[in-house]
Amino acid sequence: MGEYINVVETFGCDVFNDSVMQARLPKKVYRDLKKTIEEGKELTMEIADVVAHEMKEWAIEKGATHYSHWFQPLTGVTAEKHDAFITAPMDNGKVLMSFSGKELIKGEPDASSFPSGGLRATFEARGYTTWDCTSPAFVRHDAAGGTLCIPTAFCSYTGEALDQKTPLLRSMQAINTQALRLIRLFGNTTSKKVTPSVGAEQEYFLIDKEKWMQRKDLIYTGRTLFGAMPPKGQEMDDHYLGTIRQRISAYMKEVNEECWKLGVAAKTQHNEVAPAQHELAPIYAPANIAADHNQIMMRILKKVASRHGMRCLLHEKPFVGVNGSGKHNNWSLTTDDGINLLEPGKTPHENIQFLLVLTCILKAVDIHADLLRESAADVGNDHRLGGNEAPPAIVSVFLGEQLEDVLEQLINTGTATHSIKGQKLETGVKTLPDFMKDATDRNRTSPFAFTGNKFEFRMVGARDSISQCNVVMNTIVAEAFKEACDRLEAADDFDLAVHDLIKEYASAHQRIVFNGNGYAPEWAEEAAKRGLPNLPSMVDAIPALTTEKSVKLFETFGVFTKAELESRAEIQYEIYAKAINIEAKTMIDIATKQIIPAVIKYTIVLAESINQVRSAGTDIDVSVQMDLLKRSSVLLRETNEAMGALKEQVEKIASVPEGRERAVFCREQVFRDMNALRKPVDELEMIVDKEMWPMPSYGDLIFEV
């Protein structure tokens, strides 16, 4: 049995959190820093120097030798540059350990090597990282020793956001301002702040490291580019919530411990639907901290897997034919004194503030459905969305029977007089207690579902930062709140005005509400009739960033400038084209060096077998070998022809103008020919002797962990 830790004592032990600051900082410094964190007060350099000194002393006690401004550029991963605490040697040959307020507040990484979408020229290298004091610093222990990681925003020399955190913090300010306006209208004078609270459920696959090393496609692209389905996949549903194997349990235990030490409140773990797939869910945190924690969690999942002889796959669709992986971004709005604005209460039809918040969100999602879809746009997610496993690519809102009934009352009669209550669930077994069930079922096919006191956005890809979708949700809801407050603040009769506004929003945006099966083909037809956007691929979704509507939205609230939006669209197009190019080249490499040689060897063995059997007697039947040889040869020819066609397309990529045109070419031409190459290869895998096939099969990868 392994060692067991005291979770209460361990949790947050490597985090420079509030309790550490309160214990180590002078009272006045602590109070001033808290005002900065909670109220956005300016942080003076004098305060920063004291905080930096105590942070350094604490980090050194934790074994840290270096510090790093830890940031999230637009590369899809985090970035860091490590600096030692040591200063120049003194005359006696000794060194001092120092860390100033200036070093805490500001870093200067090279901005020219990160994606900027044309905002910065290659020779314009200066960029700044700025301490996000609302997200606590932490000490990370790994092979490099201890490193003090300081969560930071990352901007260019001219002030444009080059990261995920900066727009997220801007959007949190926007929704705080507008949400406070709204609750003040309902008489709340005590709450000082409204914060988006987020809990991001993380799905992932675990496979054996040795088998991973034999798959070039997994190494280079994160997903299998070839692979035939095994006789059994996930159709028996026996893996979902099944007993967790001992090897996986040991892994999960260590993941939890690593997360807890860094203040990540990992809570729920279980087997997911697909074989070798699992999920880890944390407790809610403010949106920017939740985004940081999700990045920490993904790194821990990968790091711990290596220690256990496994590889953690975070690609959205590592295996064709089995469920892919995503994140479920659970979003709500909470005040500093503990009020959840999305809590309907026992009688939601009487909760006027909740109904206004709800209908504002319906309006926001309806108007900006294209933006919300784009926030989950990812090359890997194209394989997942709409594949009867994740939500469809069409954005809709699930409200459930109770709230849908309340809205229908408002729309039809102008007044809601009752709410559907939860009924007693009778099991029919005397020894089992009866209990009250929820008034509403859940709907796992909905992209944006109300689940009690929060909305669950289920479209985000497993590898992606949750910052993007939360930036969009915060900003579009801030816009809806602003427009509602503008009208209500000018109204002569508030009660009548708010009643009319709720009815107006419910009626005008009813089309976005859908409680049925989002996987059904009929829904796509129905959505088209309703005028809802259907954006099946990343390339289709990217233009939503730069529409006149989006530019106005983000500029109004200071979340993005037009230039920043255009740069992000360019980065998205570039990412898509590069990813497809790498995948296509990897397919060609594998087919040329592994698959075609293996099939040739197999056909030689078959031919030799036929000749040897015939030499033993002319009356011996060799029809089976002949059929296999003919079929293998036909598929080998098809493979070679498809590979040649793909090579031609890959050679054309560089000549296609960068940006949208190149991304569209990769989507419509290169990706099509990639699928054409995969088809005969996967058929060959079902024919060729397993001992001769040059890589582990799906069965080897997902059932032998």
Image (spheres, rainbow, N blue to C red):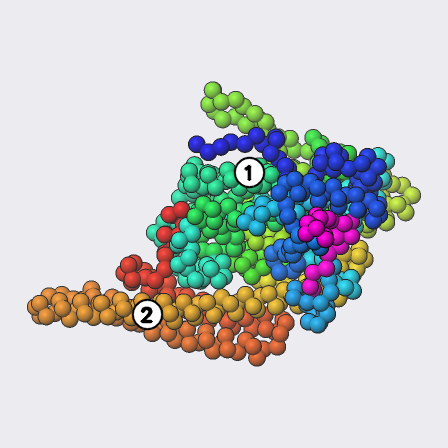
Identified by mark 1, the residue type is Glu
Tell me the chief SS of the magenta region: loop
Q: Position of residue 641 (x, y in %)?
A: 39, 75
Identified by mark 2, the residue type is Pro
Mark 1 packing: few (<14 Cα in 10 Å), some, or many (20+)? many
Which badge, 2 or 1, is on the more N-terminal residue? 1
Image quarter for residue 368?
bottom right
The answer to whether residue 192 is visible is no
Q: Secondary structure at mark 1?
A: helix
Q: Position of residue 96 (x, y in %)?
A: 71, 48
Question: Does 104 appear in magenta?
Answer: yes
Question: Does 572 appear in magenta?
Answer: no
Image quarter for residue 675?
bottom left
Q: Is residue 307 toward the left or the right of residue 658 in the image?
A: left
Q: Is residue 447 toward the left or the right of residue 187 in the image?
A: left
Instruction: State which region is magenta.
Output: 90-111
Please give the residue where the numbered disc 2 appears in the rendered image.
Answer: 597
**Which residue is rendered at x = 34% and y = 74% of the image?**
637
Viewer-proximal residue, 519 or 135?
A: 135
Q: Nearer the viewer, mark 2 or mark 1?
A: 1
**Which residue is rendered at x = 61% and y = 30% of the image?**
8
Please give the residue where the numbered disc 1 appears in the rendered image.
Answer: 257
**Which residue is rendered at x = 78% and y = 52% of the image?**
102
Viewer-proximal residue, 399 or 553?
A: 553
Q: Is residue 85 above or below residue 544?
A: above
Q: Gap between marks 2 and 1, in whole Å? A: 46 Å
Viewer-proximal residue, 370 or 252?
A: 252
Q: Secondary structure at mark 2?
A: helix
